[in-house]
Amino acid sequence: MEFYCEPCETAMCRECTEGERREHRDHRTVPLRDVLEQHKAALQHQLDAVRARLPQLAAAVGLVAEISRQLGQRRAEAEAEIGSSFEELEAALRQRREVLLRDLEATCAAKQQVTHLGLCALHQPFLGACPDGAAAEAEVQDNRNGTYELVYTPRSEGDFVLSILLYGQPVRGSPFRARALRPSDVPPSPEEAKRRVKSPGGGHVRQKALRRPASMYGSAKRKENPIEDELIFRVGSRGREKGEVTNLQGISTSSAGRIVVADSNNQCVQVFSNEGQFRLRFGVRGRSPGQLQSPTGVSVDTNGDIIVADYDNRWVSVFSPEGKFKTKLGAGRLMGPKGVAVDKNGHIIVVDNKACCVFIFQPNGKLVARFGSRGTAERQFAGPHFVAVNNKNEIVVTDFHNHSVKVYNAEGEFLFKFGSHGEGNGQFNAPTGVAVDSNGNIIVADWGNSRIQVFDSAGSFLSYINTAADPLYGPQGLALTSDGHVVVADS
């Protein structure tokens, strides 16, 4: 091989260029040695160009590999998040199904009982024995909600024995004793307190607006417990302007000398100084994060952040001390958050009024524990309202329709309860707000009896608070200021 045919791009021998049968006679040929040098130079140039691009190609390959790895990782994270969300939704649906079934069962049982008794039996005569021993019939009013009222107006003052019969048999507690007074002997009370009112947690309770005498704290009890019932000041009036409130519910205080109030019907939170001066108002009606829909419970953590139980939005919102929205927690789990508190570990404790249970969350929203269900047992509730934490980090919850206060440890284990239905000392008619002072004494708003009662750390009655000059009518939230005064949200 001595020559190179450029048109054919092939090496050839001398015989191919000579003789009659030469194959490349019309082609341009060059010595093979020259062609090799030329191709060698061209190949070297291309090789150098490829070598120059090798780092770029290597970097591109590495980038593609990293993108592929990240894509796989993100896919795994997305799959895990989707799985977790569906598990939470499934758990929430199961929980909601159980609650609805329990409510349905209770409703059906109540209606069946009413049907079984029969309206005719419920309209049997209600007899009242007058002071002179004569019997009189009373009027039966059907409330058309499964309940009935018996109305009897005595014609004279004195002591009465009231017997209620059903199927000829006395109902539970009958006969009842009552005393009738002349109108002139009854202290005046606002017209609003005479109506039947419905609590925010549901269910009707006859609320009493009474002018009670001053509490026992003015005497020997003062040394045992320094709480007094002398009214220092009152702030607020009905309205929608700054400093005005409409159906205030929860109340809390901070070490910075601030009083924070959940103004439920105005869909906002208002802040006052310890002296009652208006400082701040924030919140607008809505169902988006940062908006409020019937705020009820409120608490302040060690950072000054304001934590609000948003009843109708079914979550808890966290705001900065200036009222700027930061985050929310409990969405998808809570059904009707009512009361809220912060324990010594920074955990956020939420009382769910509708689900009749208590949730404990970390500040980042992770669920730590949950306890309680609907019922009358120790670990059950019937419309729980507000919550407080004592100096032992124990959880104190008011049980509205069970007319009691229940105490649990930080893990939700039942410790003890106190209170029963009634008007006597230590009894409740729908308790709402609760607070604990530095001595461990438990202060409870007795909503239906229009008073505040004070108990020691073991639940033994000490006294009640309600000034005779300016009585309470619908006490809800309770808190203690940084200077030791009791603050009451009187709805």
Image: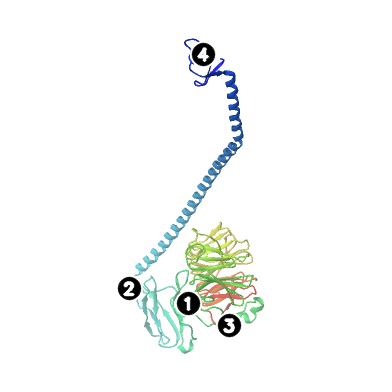
Residue, disc 3: 214
Between marks 1 and 4 in the image, the one whose residue lies nearer the viewer: 4
Q: Earlier in the sequence, mark 1 or mark 3?
A: 1
Cα–Cα span, label 3 and label 4: 135 Å
Separation of residues labelled 2 and 4 (CA atoms): 132 Å
Looking at numbered disc 3 in the image, what kind of residue is underneath it?
Ala
Disc 2 marks a residue whose amino acid type is Cys
Circle nearer the N terminus (2, 3)? 2
Image quarter (top left, top right, bottom left or bottom right) of the N terminus: top right
Q: Please provide percent x and percent y for residue 469.
A: 56, 84
- Of residues 223 and 421, the one drawn nearer to the viewer in this rendering: 223
Q: Which mark is residue 120?
A: 2
Give neighbour class at mark 1: few <14, some 14-19, many 20+ (Cα, 10 Å).
many
Name the residue beneath numbered marker 1: 207
The answer to which of 202 and 45 lies nearer the viewer is 45
Q: Earlier in the sequence, mark 1 or mark 4?
A: 4
Residue 149: which quarter of the image?
bottom left
Name which quarter of the figure residue 219 lies in: bottom right
The picture places residue 333, in percent across and down from the top left corner, at 50, 58
In the displayed structure, would residue 89 be above or below residue 1?
A: below
Q: Quadrant of residue 131?
A: bottom left
Circle 4 residues within 10 Å: few <14, some 14–19, many ≥20: some
* Residue topped by disc 4: 17
Amino acid type at circle 4 is: Thr
